Image (cartoon, rainbow, N blue to C red):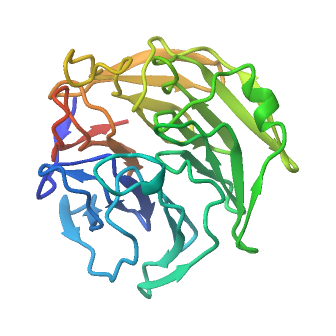
Amino acid sequence: MAERCADLPHGLTASAHFMVDGEAYIFGGRTENSDFSNCMYKYDCVQDQWNIVETNIPLKPCVRPRAISVGDKVYIGLGAYGKVLIDSTYLQDWWEWTPQSNEWKQLTDYPSNRTVGPVVFSDNRYIYMAYGGMQNFERWIFRYDISRDEWLKLSDGIARMATYPPRAHSAAGTNCGNRFFLGAGFFRGSHDFWVEMEFVNDSVIWHRRSSLPSKRHNAVAISDGRYIYVAGGSYHGGTVTTGQVYDDILRYDPINDQWEFWGKLPDGGRENMVGWICNDTLYIGLGSDKYNRPCKQLYRIAL
C-alpha cells in the first residue's frame, strides 16, 4: 500500500535525481508555471521533509538533466534549456559536486549535443550514458572515466543498435548490482524492448531479455539490487490529449528474466517521475499527469 509523503513545495517534472548518504536529491525540471528550474532539493527519508539545497549551482535552468553519485561525489549536467527543445538548446556541460564541502568543479563537456534524458549508469570507475536526444536521436553509448575526466564513445554501439531501434530521451534503465539494463523508450512510437548491456573493455555486448508487458516511454526505473521496478510512463505521443499515461509499477526479476505487475500509483498515471530506494522502501513521485501538469506528490511503498 502506497503512503503519501510530504509534498514538494511545488510541482516538478523531468528532473534529475540521485542519492547521497541516504538522502535523496532532485535537480532541474519543469515547474507548474512552465519555467525551467535550476534549484536543488533534498529529501530526508527519516524526517519526511523537503529542503532546498543552499548552493551556488553553476548549471542553467534546464529540463531532463542527468545526475549520478559515485562515492561522496555527484556528477551532474546535460539536459536542455529554453522553451523549444531544439539542438541549439542542448546543454553539454558536465560538473562534479561535493556535497560535504559544497564545491563545484567543471569537467570535460559531454561529447554529443544529444543530451536530453540519456540513461545513466555507473560501476564506480566509469559512468555510462546511453541514448539521449529529442528532435534527433543519439545512437551511441559514451563512457566517462572519472579519474581521467575523459569521455569515450564505445565501439559496437552503432553495430548493435541495428538490432534495436535507437531511442531518444525517453528510455528507462538502471544498474541491478553489477548488471546494467535498459529498455522501453520512443522511436516512431513507444517500445517494449528490454536488454542487458555488458561492458567489455571499450565495447558493448547486448543481450536481449524479456520484453516489458506493455510499450511505453518516459518511465522511471529503480533497483533495490535484487529487482528492478519500472513505473509510469506514457504510450506513443498521446500523453496530453489522449491521457495514455500509465499508473502501474512493474517488477523485473533479472535472475529469472521475468516481469510481473507489482502495484499502482495512487493518483493515476504519471510520466517523467523520480524514484529511489531508501531503508527497504521505494520512493516514487513528482513527474507529470495525463494533462502534462507537473506534480508535487511523493509516495513510499515498503518492499
Quadrant for the N terminus in the image: top left
Please tell me whether residue 79 is drawn above or below residue 23 in the rendered image: above
Note whether 1 is above or below 125 in the view shown.
Answer: above
Q: Does 171 appear above or below 9?
A: above
Give the residue drawn at x 53%, y 82%. 105
Quarter assignment of residue 302? top left
Q: Position of residue 241 (x, y in %)?
A: 19, 19
Q: Residue 36: x percent and y percent? A: 26, 57
Q: Is residue 160 left or right of residue 183?
A: right
Q: Residue at x 51, y 33 (%)?
A: 171
Nearer to the camera, 303 or 81:
81
**Residue 243: % across, % down:** 21, 18
Q: Is residue 10 left or right of residue 271?
A: left
Return the residue nearer the eye: 272 or 251.
Answer: 272
Q: Residue at x 39, y 50 (%)?
A: 64
Front residue of this view, candidates 123 and 190: 190
- Quadrant of the rendered image containing residue 225: top right
Identify the residue at horizontal 40%, vertical 31% (top origin): 219
The quadrant of the picture occupied by the C terminus is top left
